[in-house]
Image (tube, helix red, strand yellow):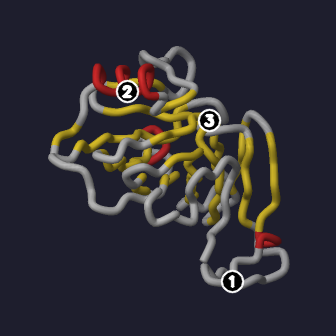
Amino acid sequence: MAIMPDRWIRKMAVSRGMIEPFVESQKREGCISYGVSSYGYDARVSEDFKIFTNVDSALVDPKEFVSESFVERTGDVCVIPPNSFALARTVEYFRVPRDVLVICLGKSTYARCGIIVNVTPLEPEWEGHVTLEFSNTTPLPAKIYANEGACQFIFLKADEDCEVSYADRSGKYQGQTGVTLPRL
């Protein structure tokens, strides 16, 4: 298994539509960086956010998730309350090749502010907008900036194809396009 470099990411994005829209060089001027890096791709967060709220003292249950636990916001900035979290999605739509596993890591700029992006795998042949989970671990409100870098995707190419891909087993998050809540 190998970590794939910038030139491979560019080739796959352009020739196979692995990432759309695709930014082929790193953008950094006045923003949290996004685009191709040496061994990864820094994706942007969209303007659509679902911010966790506990107005009704709801219980968080992944088997019976109550969508009313979130307030929806659209805009250039999302403010996450102290010790809370928000869901969002990537601007980019991903199509993962059958012989690749993708790992999502949080950006250090946010981590240094106490904002954690959940580590998420994208399995072979998964496709869609990635739902991102931002946790504000601080006792203060925290900002997330739409259309700027939010996380980095690392592409791990296997020595051979998997026997059963995410698409083969009709994974429950296949083809998601919005901010997607937990499914059972």
| Label 2 environment density (alpha carbons within 10 Å; few <14, some 14–19, many ≥20) | some
Residue 77, x across and y down, in percent: 72, 38
N-terminal label among 2 and 3: 2
Q: Distance between the residues labelled 2 and 3?
A: 18 Å
N-terminal label among 1 and 3: 1
Q: How far apart are marks 2 and 1 (CA)?
A: 38 Å
Determine the residue positioned at 57% across, 46% down: 128
Residue 168, x across and y down, in percent: 44, 60
**Would residue 65 be found to the left or right of residue 175 on screen?**
right
**Would residue 152 be found to the left or right of residue 182 on screen?**
left
Whether pointer 1 and pointer 3 mark residues with C-beta atoms closer than 8 Å, the reply is: no
Residue 23, x across and y down, in percent: 50, 20
In the depicted view, which residue is nearer to us: 144 or 82?
144
- Which of the labelled discs sits on residue 64, or is there none? 1
What is the secondary structure assignment of the residue under circle 2?
A: helix
Image quarter where the C terminus lies is bottom right
Q: Can residue 108 be seen in this view?
A: no
